[in-house]
Amino acid sequence: MPKRLGPHQTTHPLIWCVSIVCAILTVLVIIGGIVVFIGYATLRPKVPQVRVARAQMDTIYFDQSNLMMLQSTIVVKADNDNTRARASFYDMDYTLSFRNQKIAILMADPFDVKPNHSLDLNFVAQSHPIPLNQEEADAVNLSLEQGVVDLDLRGMSRTRWKVWLIGSVKYALHLDCKLHLPVNHTTIHHPPACASRTS
């Protein structure tokens, strides 16, 4: 049989205390969520980015023995569009290649970018003599005839920045782009599809 409360029975004070504490905690959680949402909407945190700002073919040498050497200048820009948070970049490692033939590895020591600022990293990529197979040699000859050499830049870096009450946020920045570099030393600016993707 269910227990019935008579006219002289009352709820235990401990139950009232627990109910009050739960109500207070619920209100605090709601207020905290509203504060975080307002702060997030106000600050509008943005993921820092890495992109190729400009690139240039400095020199290219190719002989009848199918040996190739080249030097190119690549400027990688690290952007921090957050208005209040400093962004850290680290583990930067990008590989410059021609048809899977590694030319150079672009690396940088960890660095910080101030809020709402950017930083240019100047890389001079110089290869050792690279022996090419016949297919690769034909591709170089065609590129020289057309006046444009296609290079691939692939790799990643990591970024970390603090988002107000949320705390430190980390992302991997992947870069995978093709650089169409004129052999007449013309500098290309902001090549398409050469900005990082996050993961």
Image: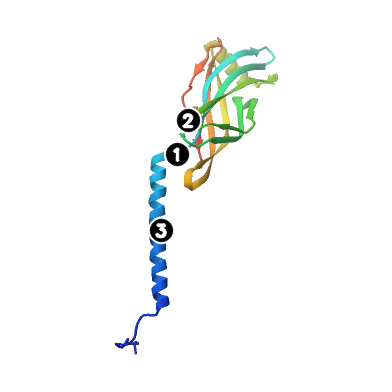
Work out whether 34 lies above or below 62: below
Q: Residue at x 66, y 16 (%)?
A: 69
x%, y% of residue 153?
Answer: 57, 27
Q: Which residue position is annotated with label 2?
A: 116
Mark 2 residue type: Asn
Q: Amino acid at mark 1?
A: Pro
Residue 74 place in picture, x, y as percent: 57, 21
Q: CA distance from mark 1 to mark 2?
A: 11 Å
- Kind of residue at disc 3: Leu
Q: Residue lying farthest bottom?
A: 1
Which mark identifies residue 28? 3
Q: Which mark is first along the chain, 3 or 1?
A: 3
Q: Residue at x 32, y 87 (%)?
A: 8
Is disc 1 placed on a helix, strand or loop?
Answer: loop
Out of 74 and 153, give the one closest to the viewer.
74
Residue contact between numbered discs 1 and 2, judged by CB atoms under 8 Å: no
**Given this view, does label 1 or label 3 mark the residue nearer the observer?**
3
Q: State left or right for residue 166 relative to residue 104.
A: left
63 or 17: nearer the eye? 17
Between the C-alphas of marks 1 and 3, the distance is: 24 Å
- Quickly name the residue at label 1: 45
Question: Which image quadrant is residue 149 in?
Answer: top right
